[in-house]
Image (tube, helix red, strand yellow):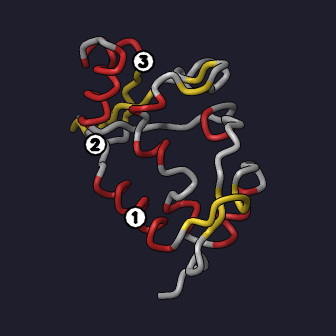
Amino acid sequence: MKRFYEDGLRFTCRQCSHCCKDEPGYVFLSEQEMTSIAGHLSISEDEFIQEYCKTVNMGTFSMISIRERKNNDCIFLSEAGCTIYPVRPVQCRSYPFWASLVDSEEDWEREAGECPGMNEGELHSREEIEGWLQKRRENQPKMFYN
């Protein structure tokens, strides 16, 4: 099946933090991501979850998401940028190459209206984009059955 991004897509992060602030959302975490971030912060995994996360009830199961401030900014977003940048979750690393954004050209262009780095800068190949999609599939969030 030919994808609209067959010849690649342009994206270079402009560090505007659009993907990290202003709108509510979830950054669901895998077990490995929780361990990495807790280690980076030099705290236990339990402390990390208690201090920086929230449990999101999805019906028959729940998942752990990074907490947001009251203004919907990520709790790890500071004036200087992401305070956990070296260990940020795959969800953050892979933006804007999310299935929901590369499913259709319309979805891509709608998001590009909000993100100044999309359709600009570095050309990312179809293989690279699909590599990010695969990493997202492989890095499943930890689920707790209710």
Q: Quadrant of residue 3?
A: bottom right
Residue furthest bottom in the image: 1
| Rendered residue at 41%/38% (across/down) | 89
Q: Residue tagged by mark 2?
A: 60
User: Is 112 drawn above or below residue 66 in the view shown?
Assistant: below
As drawn, the label of residue 52 is 3
Crowd around label 2: few <14 · some 14–19 · many ≥20 (10 Å) = few
Per the rendering, the mark at residue 131 is 1
Residue nearer the viewer, 112 or 22 = 112
Three-letter amino acid code at the position of disc 1: Gly
Residue 42, image x, y percentages: 30, 12
Left or right: where does residue 22 sit relative to residue 138? right
3 or 1: tag closer to the N-terminus? 3
Per the image, label 2 sits on a secondary structure element best described as: loop
Tally the marks: 3
Alpha-carbon neighbours of circle 1 within 10 Å: few (<14), some, or many (≥20)?
some
What residue is rendered at 66% in x and 64% in y?
A: 10
Q: Residues within 10 Å of mark 3 (few under 14, many from 20)?
A: some
In front here: 134 or 56? 134
Identity of the residue drawn at 43% across and 34% down: 88
Picture coordinates of residue 74 (x, y %)?
Answer: 56, 26
50 in relation to 63, above or below: above
Quarter of the image with the C terminus is top left
Q: Amino acid at mark 2?
A: Thr
